[in-house]
Image (cartoon, rainbow, N blue to C red):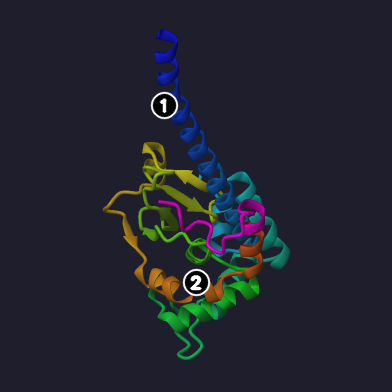
Amino acid sequence: MRSKKTWILFIPIFLFATIGEGAGIEKERFKNAINYLSALVAHKYQLSTTGYQSAMIKDSTKLTPQRAKEYTAKAKEVYPTETLKNLGILQSTYINKIPETGELSDPHHMNEKQLTACLGRCREKSFANCEIQSLEIAIHLYTLGFKKFKIWSNKAISHNYVVIEPTTLFPKGAIIDSYFGWGITEVNFKTINKYKHYSQNIQVVQNMLDWVDKNATAQANKYWIAVIRTKFFPEGSSTPLDSVE
């Protein structure tokens, strides 16, 4: 009789362990896929005015050493002399210039048509500061089926990044940051303090989120999406992240 009771008690423990292991596998796969996406964005965009400036700050802890090296090497490759000046000229005379009016604008204040055109110019030159890198992350998350995120502008650190809202896999949420080179990082006290992600400092970039809703699928890099699906979600779903709750 005792052995029978022991067997009955054993079943729930076994099931709990199996469920926990399954959730852990899904979380790891999600993280690996997003880190891969972040790396694709980082590889594409190694030319950046603000990235180069941050890389020039001695002992800066914002950028990963690899990301600082990428920004510096690419800037010097494209502009061997007067590097920062020429990066600024590229940004002001082409990337952020509205062709129709000749005025300068940042992506936060562009309308749908202007933001689409700006993204095209950034992709052409492989140039992007944090705004467009965040937009690229958002485009591809959305196209993969995951929509529980926001793009935040943080005035305390003059930075933009994507924040995943709390889910079963990430109960406190997570930050995705290709610009600094950190990939996906779960939200905790250390992360919040590092990013100074406090209500008085942050604001949702609504025009970019509205743009993503309308344009993400059409504007996503089809090769990136195909590779991520094949590499991390071989089951074949076209939107493999839409089941993440």
Disc 1 residue type (three-letter): Pro
Label number found at residue 216:
2
Residue 85 in the magenta stretch? The answer is no
Cα separation between marks 2 and 1: 43 Å
Q: Secondary structure at mark 1?
A: helix
Judged from this view, the residue extending furthest toward the left is 200
Q: Is residue 163 above or below residue 220?
A: above
Nearer to us in this view, 98 or 13: 13
Position of residue 98 measured from the top left corner of the image (x, y, whole percent) = 48, 84
> What is the span of residues highlighted in magenta in the rendered image?
229-245
Sooner in the amino-acid sequence: mark 2 or mark 1: 1
Q: Residue at x 37, y 52 (%)?
A: 165
Give the number of callouts. Answer: 2
Nearer to us in this view, 78 or 224: 224
Decide if residue 128 is on the left or right side of residue 78: left
Question: Which residue is disc 1 drawn over?
Answer: 12
